[in-house]
């Protein structure tokens, strides 16, 4: 993992060194981040991963702090990873889901958030189907807000864990590495966050899939749109599959899932178009047999479960950094 600007090796840095360059209260999106900020998150995630393996009791404690998981849209791995991340840091976690909250009784997000703040949550992790809601929330509450996915806009911690996992496999520097994102790009917050993160880290991004879900105007973001799947896969160092985001589509973008599978599903035959060392990624949930065959999802080339595990360390880093920017990383239990 890259050394910081000081040139000192990562293992010689203490928590203060690792957090010194982070000034943001919130993590709302990848788009405005500088490359150095992504490096800072990755370095701290790396440190947490090493400590977890070697000496878990030396992980700095956020005991006495409360992380509130406000999940207004369904989630399994993101919600659980944030929960485990907070607990590994010694913080308390409270979960509010839409069905079990007053939001179903018509309470606004603003009111819910203010109540939550009055209850003294120290961090709010928000997943919401409306793009921009974490930003809106961050303007209302004083505590850090972390975006856990907002509509088709961004899913910043997913891109952070994806690029962290790529760095572990493809080499510390992603400069010049080729990453192909295949599937429903149009409605994917994962694609958007990854496009920003990968470009900031120097990687080259190619998008592929049905033309209706991979509009050519994405090229304005500086990526290559390659609708010929064979070409899109041929020189990739990593391929990231995306699920069809039915919940965000308002019209039909291809005839049927069977059609999608027959044209774009990654199966053994198409997997052979990849370089032998290319890795296969998926943010989950995987629709097995549609965008990805089980034989590949469960193969040695798949890093899908490593992505899930790395999601804990990257989210520990994000929670810790946002609290450190507010001067709230001290253990409050003593
Ligand atoms: N889990 C990812 C997300 O929340 C990807 C997906 O749902 O397909 O956006």
Image (tube, rainbow, N blue to C red):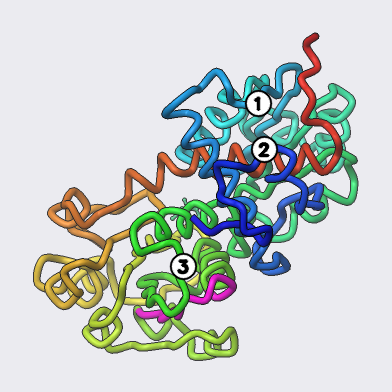
User: Would you say the beta carbon of the disc 3 residue lies within 8 angstroms of ligand 1?
Assistant: no
Q: Along the line of sight, which residue is nearer the eye, 2 or 115? A: 2
Looking at the image, residue 128 sits to the left or right of residue 260; the answer is right
Looking at the image, residue 287 sits to the left or right of residue 223; the answer is left
Q: Name the residue under label 2.
A: 14
- The tag earlier along the polypeptide, 2 or 3, is 2
Q: Mark 3 points at which residue?
A: 173
Per the image, label 3 sits on a secondary structure element best described as loop
Give residue 249's mark: none
Tell me the residue at 23%/68% (across/down): 265
Tell me the residue at 36%/75% (across/down): 180
Task: State the image coordinates of residue 270 (x, y, percent, origin top left).
Answer: 15, 74
Which of the 4 quarters of the picture holds residue 112? top right
Looking at the image, residue 254 sits to the left or right of residue 9; the answer is left
Q: Give the range drawn in magenta.
A: 199-208
In the rendered view, tell whether residue 212 sits above or below residue 40: below
In the rendered view, tell whether residue 284 sits above or below residue 37: above
User: Would you say the beta carbon of the disc 2 residue lies within 8 angstroms of ligand 1?
Assistant: no
């Amino acid at each position: 993992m890259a050394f910081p600007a000081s040139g000192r090796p990562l293992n010689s840095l203490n928590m203060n060194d690792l957090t010194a360059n982070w000034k943001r209260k919130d993590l709302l999106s990848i788009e405005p981040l500088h490359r150095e900020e992504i490096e800072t998150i990755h370095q701290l995630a790396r440190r947490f991963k090493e400590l977890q393996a070697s000496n878990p009791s030396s992980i700095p404690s956020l005991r006495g702090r409360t992380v509130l998981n406000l999940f207004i849209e369904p989630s399994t791995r993101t919600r659980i990873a944030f929960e485990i991340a907070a607990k590994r840091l010694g913080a308390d976690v409270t979960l509010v889901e839409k069905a079990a909250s007053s939001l179903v009784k018509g309470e606004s997000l603003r009111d819910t958030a203010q109540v939550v703040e009055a209850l003294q949550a120290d961090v709010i992790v928000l997943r919401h189907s409306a793009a921009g809601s974490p930003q809106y929330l961050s303007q209302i509450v004083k505590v850090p807000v972390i975006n856990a996915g907002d509509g088709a806009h961004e899913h910043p911690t997913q891109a952070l864990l994806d690029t962290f996992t790529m760095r572990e496999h493809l080499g510390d520097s992603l400069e010049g590495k080729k990453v192909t994102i295949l599937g429903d790009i149009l409605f994917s917050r994962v694609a958007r966050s990854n496009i920003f993160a990968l470009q900031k880290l120097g990687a080259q991004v190619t998008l592929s899939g049905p033309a209706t879900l991979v509009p050519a105007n994405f090229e304005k973001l500086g990526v290559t749109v390659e609708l010929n799947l064979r070409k899109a896969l041929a020189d990739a160092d990593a391929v990231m599959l995306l699920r069809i985001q039915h919940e965000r589509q308002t019209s039909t973008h291809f005839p049927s899932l069977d059609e999608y599978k027959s044209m774009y599903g990654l199966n053994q035959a198409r997997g052979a178009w990849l370089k032998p060392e290319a890795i296969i990624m998926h943010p989950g949930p995987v629709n097995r047999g549609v965008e990805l065959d089980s034989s590949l999802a469960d193969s040695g080339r798949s890093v899908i479960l490593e992505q899930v595990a790395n999601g804990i360390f990257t989210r520990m880093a994000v929670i810790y950094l946002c609290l450190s920017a507010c001067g709230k990383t001290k253990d409050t239990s003593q």
